[in-house]
Amino acid sequence: MAKKIGVTMEVGNDGVAVITISNPPVNSLASPIISGLKEKFRDANQRIDVKAIVLIGNNGRFSGGFDINVFQQVHKTGDLSLMPEVSVELVCNLMEDSRKPLVAAVEGLALGGGLELAMACHARVAAPKAQLGLPELTLGVIPGFGGTQRLPRLVGLAKATDMILLSKSISSEEGQKLGLIDALVPPGDVLSTSRKWALDIAEGRKPFLRSLHRTDKIGSLSEARAILKTSRQLAKKIAPNMPQHHACIEVIEEGIIHGGYSGVLKEAEVFKQLVLSDTAKGLVHVFFAQRATSKVPNVTDVGLKPRPIKKVAVIGGGLMGSGIATALLLSNIRVVLKEINSEYLMKGIKSVEANMKGLVSRGKLTQDKAGKALSLFKGVLDYTEFKDVDMVIEAVIENIQLKQNIFKEIEKVCSPHCILASNTSTIDLDVIGEKTNSKDRIVGAHFFSPAHLMPLLEIVRSKNTSAQVILDLMAVGKAIKKVPVVVGNCIGFAVNRTFFPYSQAAHMLANLGVDLFRIDSVITSFGLPLGPFQLGDLAGHGIGLAVGPIYAKVYGDRMFRSPMTELLLKSGRNGKINGKGYYIYEKGSKPKPDPSVLSVVEESRKLTNIMPGGKPISVSDKEIVEMILFPVVNEACRVLDEGVVIRASDLDIASVLGMSFPSYRGGIVFWADTVGPKYIYERLKRLSETYGSFFKPSRYLEERAMNGMLLSESKSSRSRL
Ligand SMILES: CCC[C@H](O)CC(=O)SCCNC(=O)CCNC(=O)[C@H](O)C(C)(C)COP(=O)([O-])OP(=O)([O-])OC[C@H]1O[C@@H](n2cnc3c(N)ncnc32)[C@H](O)[C@@H]1OP(=O)([O-])[O-]
Ligand SMILES: NC(=O)c1ccc[n+]([C@@H]2O[C@H](COP(=O)([O-])OP(=O)(O)OC[C@H]3O[C@@H](n4cnc5c(N)ncnc54)[C@H](O)[C@@H]3O)[C@@H](O)[C@H]2O)c1
């Protein structure tokens, strides 16, 4: 059925015109909506039978803001004229400066441009639990319909900068306390109260307030300057590589110094510069990439419905199992945790409790909710409780035989509909299920550590996994607030496989004589939160040593064999876990580079003996980035070529959410496309001539470079999905 897009106006006998925005699912402000709003407001202002106006969104949602698809069109075409003129013509002239009072009837959500329209109204009536916010900075732009000016005038400068810079939305309850919402009423009363409110303003019983003209919440100039100074410090900390936070503060400041209208004009000018920035391109891409993951061919488009998953068994209460159990419990899913003996079981239960406690102490969870979640939790040492679970997630140590035996056992004790998932990070799912007759319900549920915090869930589909099982696991993933990305079965799946050259390239550089702390610092300046050596410390070097041979078996021709990890472990350094690795870890202080680790590096250099002429190579920061990340791009090309992901943007979102690749660079493939496949190919080719096959460009990269194509452009014919 075609969706109904448009703006309607109905004038009641009370003389109130109700203007309704309809653009399912979130009433985004697409071009026809904006022109419809202009037309209806003009109409309402002219009609003599209209005394007052109410603005509302259809289907219980006010508006999710400006249509983000338009940003994407602007990015594709570079044509800024696709952006309609709104902030002055519609928002200031037709709405805020209208002679007839306007009331926003806010239900569900008012985000971005949606909230900005509501703030241009003369009062706001809201239903409970509506979501209110200006999340534009997450898209690389700033609010562009006057939000930078009106929000500070309605809620005060400190709160407004906090909400805008951190893209934090608030509930209508909080909005009422702050003065953003004038009345909070039951959902069924929102429209009737808004009508009455609008008439009350029209007839002088309530004040006719224009947000942009207000000054009562701004405070003195010196107070404002102090708040903006703190905001600038915050922006520097949270977004060192992005322009929109600082630009936004400048725009807010303009309005404080020269008045709201001047601020609106500057806002429009800055918005136009930012919308074409690389940051906006990357972040808008990530927005759509994340939503695209929920569309899986032959799974989400064949009329299947997800089955309810109410009780899950987790096998193994170690690092991963306890995190997975925590995530499930937090979404009200009952969990039984199975361990090998009571000592390990207690350890697992304590870890889950500690996870909850951590969330409570950081203000992310109430004590009450933590208590409720833990009441759904039970530890067990046998399979009795497994008979009525809807899903098992196995998270025992990475041992093929152990996992095969466990799957054979659970096949017997669970019901035939039960999903049998493994959190393995490297073992082939077909091998895990080899001894069972249930291959269609075996699936990979690959979480990232710490599993209750990291947002990515890789769902690994073997050639036998049924579409229903994939759909069910996708629904569980969403229920526990993860972004599920469906990927094909191969060693390392999509994320770990793509990033396995990351630490190897770093080791190669260190063995070539480059300072390892410099490498980490260059990579963090690029935007990854941890450089390769600090990441190794965090994961623990034992893991690196254990998975190395598994990768070597399949991808051996493109491995750099560095003795450094083994030497590091021999010297008693296992990373954060035992307080020292490349860095020193002390409670309460930041990791410190450990100069004494350089003797380990020296030893490794002697053994590899790859420094040309025995002398350290000299490289620029740019070359370091290229030597570390181009091999990652190269592996991403193979992942695309083999059809391990459905679409290139799935790898982008997986790299952002699983490896913390900077979202403002759009993800690994998007970034590579902005750098240019031809450039990457040529650099890798030259590097492989100097340093060997580790850098050898893949066939996929070569083809795209030769044909002038983007890496994201072509779909593989060899899909594993
Ligand atoms: C000059 C301009 C100035 C202005 O200040 C700029 C802005 O307003 S910038 C905007 C500021 N606003 C924001 O940044 C809000 C961005 N949106 C959100 O945060 C969430 O979507 C929302 C909370 C609204 C709903 O969450 P949920 O219920 O989990 O649902 P969901 O997330 O799965 O989305 C469902 C479908 O709606 C689609 N879609 C959604 N919003 C928009 C949009 N604005 N546009 C277009 N489409 C949008 C989304 O792509 C998806 O499509 P599909 O084809 O089905 O995949
Ligand atoms: N550590 C990571 O960062 C990470 C990330 C993603 C996936 N994984 C995968 O998750 C799995 C678990 O890793 P981990 O780091 O949590 O390991 P871990 O060593 O911390 O925990 C494993 C737990 O499994 C328990 N166990 C062993 N045999 C069992 C059995 N028969 N029944 C019940 N419990 C049993 C052990 O007692 C131990 O507590 C592995 O397959 C690993 O590859 C790990």
Image: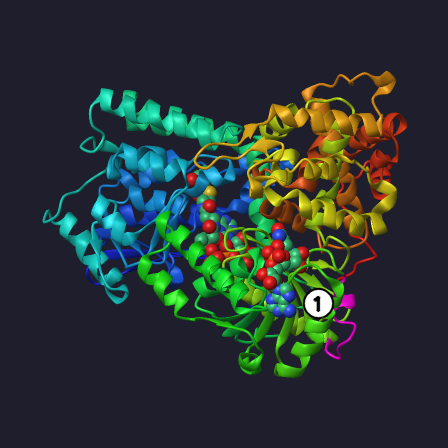
In the figure, residue 81 lies in which quadrant?
Answer: top right
Q: Is mark 1 within 8 Å of ligand 2?
A: yes
Our reading of the magenta stretch's main secondary structure is loop
> 412 or 123: which is nearer to us?
412
Residue behind mark 1: 403
Residue 223 image offset from top left, x and y in percent = 23, 24
Residue 161 image offset from top left, x and y in percent = 34, 34
Does residue 615 show up?
yes
- Quadrant of the image containing the C terminus: bottom right
- Quadrant of the image containing the N terminus: bottom right
Is 62 placed left or right of 319 in the picture? left
Residue occupying image coordinates x 45% and y 50%: 33
Q: Is residue 429 magenta?
A: yes
Instruction: Tell me which segment is drawn in magenta.
Output: 428-438
In the figure, residue 424 lies in which quadrant?
Answer: bottom right
Relative to 548, is 528 above or below?
Answer: above
Q: Is residue 194 magenta?
A: no
- Amino acid bearing label 1: Lys
